[in-house]
Image (cartoon, rainbow, N blue to C red):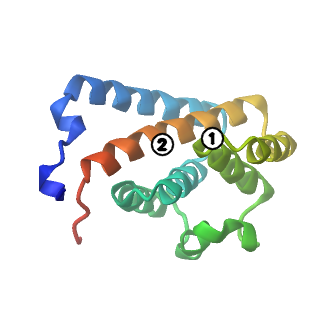
Amino acid sequence: MSADQRVFVDKQSPDAYQALVRAGEAVRATAAEAGLDRRLVELVNLRVSQLNGCAYCLNVHTRAALRAGETTQRLGVLAAWRDTEVFTGRERAALGLAEATTAPADAGLQSAAYEEARRHLGDAEISAVIWVAITINAFNRVSVLSKHPVRAG
């Protein structure tokens, strides 16, 4: 099936999509209230989008991360974050928790991620990271299943 035969579910069901957009806005506010800076939120959005193979969200959130002050070096190595020294303990805990949220059936990964998160993040931060990951997972599914295009520019 070609991309032009896909239903853009956001366009087909705009009320449902707008509800998701409003949820995303509430999650961004929750993250800010919990003390997560925009760079960390965008790292979580990007890592989850990498895992889900969502080109559209990777494009959107790479630009957002750069606007928030993220470096090209850190963005370039994000897929291999465990093998670098460029992320703080707090960021590593958030990335691990985001991955565990994206693959919830992996109980071992989930337990290890939660344990690490407890060392670096408070309850409000843990909740915010999980909500950011849940929300971007939903947006990833909308874009991947709709085959939203990524154009040059």
Q: Badge 1 is on which residue?
A: 101
Q: Quadrant of residue 83?
A: bottom right
Mark 2 and mark 1: span between their CA atoms?
A: 9 Å
Q: Badge 2 is on which residue?
A: 137
Question: In the picture, which quadrant includes the C terminus?
Answer: bottom left
Q: Residue furthest front?
A: 1
| Label 2 with label 1: CB-CB less than 8 Å | yes
User: Identity of the amino acid at label 2?
Assistant: Asn
Q: Residue furthest left?
A: 4
Q: Quadrant of residue 19?
A: top left
Question: In the picture, which quadrant includes the N terminus?
Answer: bottom left
User: Identity of the amino acid at label 1?
Assistant: Thr
Q: Residue at x 57, y 51 (%)?
A: 44
Q: Nearer the viewer, residue 32 or 21?
A: 21
Q: Residue at x 60, y 67 (%)?
A: 78
CA neighbours of label 1 inside 10 A, class few (<14), some (14 to 19), many (20+): many
Q: Secondary structure at mark 2?
A: helix
* Residue 94 position in % (x across, y down): 69, 48
Q: Nearer the viewer, residue 151 or 147?
A: 147
124 lies above or below 149: above
CA neighbours of label 2 inside 10 A, class few (<14), some (14 to 19), many (20+): many
Q: Residue at x 57, y 33 (%)?
A: 131
Question: Would you say 80 lies left or right of 114 here?
Answer: left
Q: Nearer the viewer, residue 87 or 10?
A: 10
